[in-house]
Image (cartoon, rainbow, N blue to C red):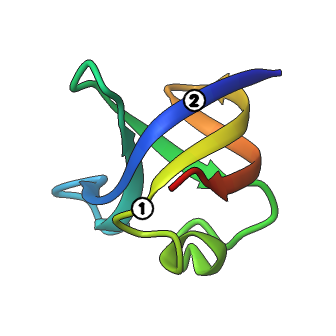
Amino acid sequence: MAALEGKLIRVPRNVGSKSEHLGFAIQTAAGQQVVIEKEGDNPFEHESLRKLEKHRVRAIGEMYRGRFIADAVDIID
């Protein structure tokens, strides 16, 4: 398991495809944006992440195919 911290923001995903939508990413203190999905959430709805948008969060999970799959996401402050 790995941990990732930063501000949870909305980002465009799959731009130019039929599955284009707004998803989420964690913007780290270093300015890197890491796409995040919550394990068990619908990857187009992101119900559990919506309430955390614009908060600083800590996510626990693993990187998989270029995105962070989180088991848990909690507000830091």
Kindly identify which numbered label has been placed on residue 4.
2
The residue closer to the viewer here, 29 or 37, is 29
Q: Position of residue 20 (x, y in %)?
A: 29, 66
Secondary structure of residue under mark 2: strand
Tell us which disc is closer to us: 2 or 1. 1
Estimate how packed mark 1 is, as few (under 14), some (14 to 19) or many (20 or more) residues with alpha carbons within 10 Å.
Answer: some
First along the sequence among labels 2 and 1 = 2
Estimate how packed mark 2 is, as few (under 14), some (14 to 19) or many (20 or more) residues with alpha carbons within 10 Å.
Answer: some
**Which residue is depicted at the point 65% across and 75% down?**
48
Q: Where is residue 30 in the image (x, y as percent from the top left)?
A: 26, 18
Corner quadrant of residue 38: bottom right
Corner quadrant of residue 69: top right
Examine the rendered structure and indicate whether residue 40 appears above or below residue 48.
Answer: above
| 21 to the left or right of 5 | left
**Which residue is depicted at the point 78% across and 55% down?**
39
**Which residue is depicted at the point 49% across and 26% down?**
66
Identify the image quadrant of the N terminus.
top right
Q: Position of residue 22 (x, y in %)?
A: 31, 68
Kindly identify which numbered label has been placed on residue 55.
1
Q: Tag 1: residue type?
A: His
